[in-house]
């Protein structure tokens, strides 16, 4: 996939530049040690023009993530939101994926770099795993222990773990993988949170070893508005074996159904699940196609 071309405009440290003319420092601590943070945000074409979904929540998390690593974001939440809309406008995007990135300055030491700067780019990106339900596997790679890194932050270096899990799954013919935590509880996929449906109730892994996804919380809120019970708790592979259905959620993946995990096949057809209902409701909400309060049909 081509993420940019000779006409693509990005934001770098106060300037709007052609992506082909932007330059980075090869001595950046982000490049050498992964000490940088990022966000994944989507904009959707609506009847009132492009709208960024939950911009404030995403940029607040960017600032939080930077703080966990000792990095400072110079732009305010409002300024970053303005920059995101300017990048969309400059590239003529309606539906788009937006990637803010906080890049540390040069530092070969292992203390936090003294300065960092903001980069923001956007590209047109369909749902990460497509529109059809997917097949997952249980990864041999575990989710990092929360006493080793800030698992609740979107730190660049953390995603080496995700690359390993995703690559392993695809080599074995699966779309993605579920990682367990160090206590053998279900954690999350390589870049998405998970929900399991059982006996007309949704279950999702509790906080602690997972990234508290903004899409995850959105789906929890939507489900509760629709009077779908949601329980946050520790889940195991045995819970998957007993489940009726499953789906995954994230900014890149949006809401994606899961047909099987390894040799575990879920009995409910995707069209007959809460996940499918929530996927439709989510799409209507982000595109402003449904101004009415959510109800379970």
Image (cartoon, grey):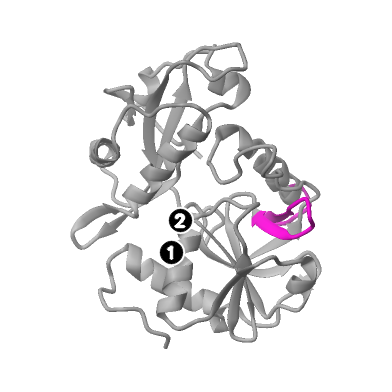
Asked which quadrant contains residue 118, the reply is top left
x and y percentages locating residue 41 in the rendered image: 40, 47
Q: Residue furthest front?
A: 147
Q: Residue at x 72, y 41 (%)?
A: 164
Q: Residue at x 74, y 51 (%)?
A: 169
x and y percentages locating residue 167 in the rendered image: 71, 44
Residue 31 seen? yes
Is residue 200 found left or right of 78 in the rendered image? right
**Against 200, is 100 above or below?**
above
Is residue 118 found left or right of 199 in the rendered image? left
- Residues 153 and 10: in front is 153
Residue 175 seen? no
- Residues 111 and 154: in front is 111
Q: Label 1's element?
A: helix
Asked which quadrant contains residue 7, the reply is top left
Is residue 52 found left or right of 142 in the rendered image? left
Q: Are marks 1 and 2 in contact (CB under 8 Å)?
A: yes
x and y percentages locating residue 180 in the rendered image: 74, 55
**Against 43, is 154 above or below?**
above
- Residues 144 and 82: in front is 144
The crowd level at tag 2 (other Cα within 10 Å; few <14, some 14-19, many 20+) is some
Is residue 61 found left or right of 132 in the rendered image? left
Q: Label 2's element?
A: helix
User: Over which residues does the magenta segment extend?
Assistant: 171-188
For residue 124, which numbered disc appears in the image? none
x and y percentages locating residue 188 in the rendered image: 64, 56
**Against 228, is 65 above or below?**
above
Q: Residue at x 42, y 16 (%)?
A: 23
For residue 214, which numbered disc appears in the image? 2
The C terminus: image quadrant: bottom left
Gap between marks 1 and 2, in whole Å?
Answer: 6 Å
Q: Which residue is mark 1?
A: 218
């Amino acid at each position: 996939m081509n993420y940019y071309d000779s006409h693509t405009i990005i934001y770098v440290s106060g300037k709007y530049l052609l992506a082909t003319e932007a330059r980075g420092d090869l001595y950046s601590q982000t490049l050498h040690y992964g000490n940088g943070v990022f966000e994944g945000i989507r904009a959707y074409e609506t009847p009132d023009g492009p709208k960024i979904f939950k911009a404030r929540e995403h940029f607040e998390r960017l600032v939080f993530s930077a703080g966990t690593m000792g990095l400072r974001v110079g732009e305010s939440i409002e300024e970053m939101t303005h920059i995101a809309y300017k990048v969309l406008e400059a590239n003529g995007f309606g539906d788009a994926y937006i990637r803010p990135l906080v890049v540390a300055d040069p530092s070969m030491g292992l203390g936090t770099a003294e300065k960092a700067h903001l980069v923001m780019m956007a590209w047109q990106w369909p749902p990460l795993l497509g529109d059809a339900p997917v097949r997952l596997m249980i990864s041999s790679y575990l989710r990092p222990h929360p006493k080793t890194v800030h698992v609740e932050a979107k730190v660049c270096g953390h995603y080496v773990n995700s690359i390993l899990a995703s690559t392993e799954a695809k080599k074995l013919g699966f779309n993605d993988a579920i990682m367990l935590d160090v206590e053998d509880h279900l954690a999350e996929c390589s870049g998405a949170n998970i929900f399991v449906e059982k006996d007309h109730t949704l279950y999702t892994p509790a906080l602690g070893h997972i990234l508290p996804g903004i899409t995850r919380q959105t789906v929890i809120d939507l489900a509760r508005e629709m009077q779908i019970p949601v329980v946050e708790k520790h889940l195991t592979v045995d819970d998957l074996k007993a489940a009726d259905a499953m789906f995954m959620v994230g900014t890149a993946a949006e809401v994606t159904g899961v047909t099987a995990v390894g040799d575990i096949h879920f009995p409910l057809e995707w069209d007959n699940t809460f996940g499918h209902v929530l996927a439709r409701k989510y799409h209507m909400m982000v595109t402003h196609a449904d101004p009415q309060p959510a109800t379970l049909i």
